[in-house]
Image: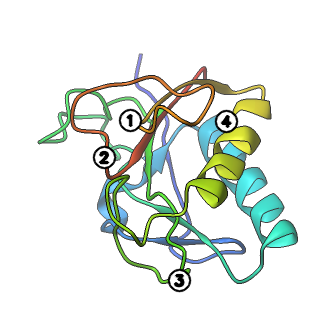
């Protein structure tokens, strides 16, 4: 049975993308969840959009360097920066905003489709440590 994946619109309310559109296909439920979370982000902090990276290829094929990101249910997010610039950061950089990232995690975990978040900031409740996740949040959805 083929998986039907939908592309995340390259532009929208409350987010920006930092991966090529060919790497941003998700299940309809995952894309809907993303758009819900991003609208809420815009409502709460209109000057701090969420950075969305890799999700999946349209054909659900292998996506190097990831081991997951195959079936449209895994999404990479950038942690927030204190200066709110649309640039990378990591939990060890002075530009990193733990408070803004914590609010994103709380919003994600409140959504019924979020299963687990891999991210290495041990000061944020609800995230799970996983090697290589100091510079992005890896969100796994249920459907």
Residue that badge 1 annotates: 120
**Disc on the earlier residue, 3 or 2:** 2
- Give the secondary structure at mark 1: loop
Residue that badge 3 annotates: 83
Q: Residue furthest top?
A: 1
Badge 1, how many Cα within 10 Å: few under 14, some, many 20+?
A: many
Residue at the spot x=71%, y=46% of the render? 32
How far apart marks 1 and 4 lie (CA) works out to 26 Å
Q: Tell me whether circle 1 and circle 3 mark residues in contact (CB < 8 Å).
A: no
In the figure, residue 48 lies in which quadrant? Answer: bottom right
Residue at the spot x=63%, y=73% of the render? 49
Percent x, y for residue 50? 58, 65
In the figure, residue 38 lies in which quadrant? Answer: bottom right
- Give the secondary structure at mark 4: helix
**Disc on the earlier residue, 1 or 3:** 3
**Disc on the earlier residue, 2 or 4:** 4
**Disc on the earlier residue, 3 or 4:** 4
Left or right: residue 86 compared with residue 142: left
Residue that badge 2 annotates: 57
How far apart marks 1 and 3 lie (CA) works out to 21 Å
Badge 4, how many Cα within 10 Å: few under 14, some, many 20+?
A: some
How far apart marks 2 and 4 lie (CA) works out to 16 Å
Left or right: residue 23 compared with residue 4: left
Left or right: residue 116 compared with residue 35: left
Give the colour scheme of this rendering.
rainbow
Indicate which disc residue 29 carries.
4
């Amino acid at each position: 049975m083929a998986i039907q994946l939908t592309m995340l619109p390259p532009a929208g309310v409350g987010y920006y993308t930092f991966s090529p559109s060919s790497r941003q296909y998700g299940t309809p439920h995952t894309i809907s969840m993303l758009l819900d979370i991003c609208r809420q982000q815009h409502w709460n902090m209109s000057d701090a959009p969420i950075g969305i990276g890799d999700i999946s290829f349209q054909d659900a094929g292998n996506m190097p360097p990831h081991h997951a990101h195959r079936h449209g249910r895994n999404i990479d997010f950038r942690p927030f920066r204190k200066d709110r610039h649309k640039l990378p950061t990591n939990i060890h950089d002075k530009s990193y905003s733990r408070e803004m990232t914590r609010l994103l995690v709380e919003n994600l975990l409140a959504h019924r489709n979020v299963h687990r978040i891999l991210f290495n900031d041990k000061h944020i409740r609800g995230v799970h440590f996983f090697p290589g996740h100091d510079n992005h949040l890896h969100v796994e959805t249920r459907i």
